[in-house]
Amino acid sequence: MAQPPDNAALPGLHLIADLYACRCAPCWMQDDALIAARLLDLVAGAGLRAVARVFHRFPGGGVTGAIVLEESHLALHTWPESCLVTMDLYVCNFSGDNRAKARALFAQLLRLYDAADARVHELDRR
């Protein structure tokens, strides 16, 4: 069996958040096109690479979206009627350690949604 690259010892980081009582503008909960554009900008600004995306706005106003990253994925779900957002970001480290980029991106997302109660979890995927 071939030897894995050094970064294979550090498969990745999974960041998960449940955001309650979000104080963001309503557009960040309901406008799928605006949310997609902003998330893609934040992904690029963090130094990660988006390769595909899909966003869907539900009749009640909530949005579900996913961005496939070269490094893995970002998913986001909004419930405007409850001011709730859930999101997860997973980055693998095959080509390099992407933990700092993931944390920077996640921090931007947390600021965007401005939750009164943010429950954030980090899972080191080894």
Image (cartoon, rainbow, N blue to C red):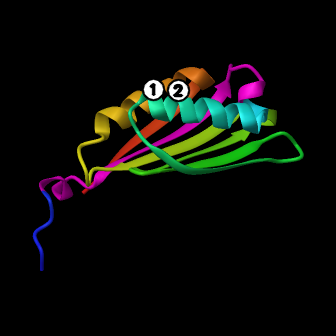
Q: Position of residue 33 (x, y in %)?
A: 74, 36
Q: Is residue 62 left or right of residue 123?
A: right
Q: Position of residue 43 (x, y in %)?
A: 48, 35
How many marks overall?
2
Q: Residue at position x 59%, y 22% from top?
A: 112
At mark 2, the secondary structure is: helix
Q: Residue at position x 62%, y 25% from top?
A: 113
Label 1 to label 2, Cα distance in Å?
Answer: 5 Å
User: In the rendered structure, does residue 52 fall within the stretch colored magenta?
Assistant: no
Q: Which mark is residue 110?
A: 2
Q: Position of residue 93 (x, y in %)?
A: 27, 50
Q: Is residue 62 left or right of residue 44?
A: right
Residue type of the residue flagged with mark 1: Ala
Quadrant of the drawing holding the C terminus: bottom left
Quadrant of the drawing holding the N terminus: bottom left
* Mark 2 closeness class: few <14, some 14–19, many ≥20 residues within 10 Å: some
Question: Can residue 83 be seen in this snapshot?
Answer: no
Q: Is residue 58 left or right of residue 47?
A: right
Q: Which mark is residue 39?
A: none
Q: Position of residue 97 (x, y in %)?
A: 24, 43
Q: Residue at position x 30%, y 39% from top?
A: 99
Region in magenta: 6-28
Residue type of the residue flagged with mark 2: Leu
